[in-house]
Amino acid sequence: MLTIRELAATRGVTFTDDTYFREYVALSDRDIFPRLWKDNGRELTTAQLKEIILLKQARYEQMVDGGHVVAFPGSIDLIRACAAKLPVAICSAASRATIEASIHALDIARCFQTIVSADDVARSKPDPAPYALAAKRLGFEPGLCVAIEDTVGGMTSALHAGCKVAAVCHTVPRERLTAATLVVDGTIDLTVERLLNL
């Protein structure tokens, strides 16, 4: 959110934290910036969108290099524990460059069998296409897959693709995630066994 807010503000586009977490949080860069501009009564050309996405990526990489990207408590241990027992994918509305920068900085890149980014699908979250593709790449029917999500858009994407969802309340309150198969306070409350039993 910080990089999005910084870039938007330099162009006179603003939003509140509440609006971000209610309306924009699960959107890809190619979707969020046009929405922000439109909601501020502005227009964003294709060329401007391309430029701002590149600027956002550069700023994010600076944050990664500065050690400002950290994982939620329990997340790294859970990812490594899952990867030791079964195939794991990343399914994100972020760009591949952003994902790669993050997982290398956190030293977990080797844990993932495949990555589905916003770059890999025509329609990103909340559309089911990203999770459908992730399941296909893993070689499983979606109904045999469990998504860990912390946004309504991500949860919606996974559920509509046919996946089960373990929702963690890192980003939005519990009451907005009740459609999930399981809702917990955070990834620290999840184990491989608990996920396999969903």
Image: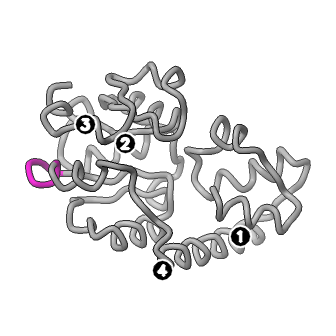
Answer with mark 3 or mark 2, whichever residue precedes in sequence. 2
The dot on residue 65 is 4
Task: Check disc 1 and report the residue beneath it.
Answer: 52
Vertical comparison of 173 with 108: above or below = above
| First in residue order: circle 1 vs circle 3 | 1
- Residue at image location 65% in from the left, 65% down from the top: 3
User: Three-letter amino acid code at disc 4?
Assistant: Asp
Q: Residue 89 vs residue 180: left or right? A: left
Residue 172 point in image, percent of width and height: 54, 34
Segment tinted magenta in the rendering: 82-87
Question: Could you say where residue 29 lies in the image, as x and y percent from the top left?
Answer: 61, 58
The residue sitting at 33% across, 28% down in the picture is 162
Instruction: Describe residue 131's horizontal placement relative to residue 175 as left or right.
Output: left
Q: Which mark is residue 131?
A: 2
Choose the circle earlier in sequence order: 3 or 4: 4
- Element at label 4: helix
Q: Is residue 38 above or below residue 64?
A: above
Amino acid carrying label 2: it is Tyr
How far apart are labels 4 and 2 at the CA level? 29 Å
Mark nearer the N terminus (2 vs 1): 1
| Residue 161, quarter of picture | top left
User: Which one is nearer the viewer's eye here, 152 or 28?
Assistant: 152
- Check disc 3: other Cα within 10 Å, few if <14, some if 14-19, many if 20+: some
Q: Amino acid at mark 1?
A: Ile
Residue 80, position as x, y percentages in the image: 18, 56
- In whole angstroms, how far apart are the C-alphas of marks 3 and 2? 20 Å
Residue at mark 3: 190
Going from N to C along the chain, the mark reached first, 4 or 1, is 1
The nearer-to-camera label among 1 and 3 is: 3
| SS of the residue under disc 2 | helix
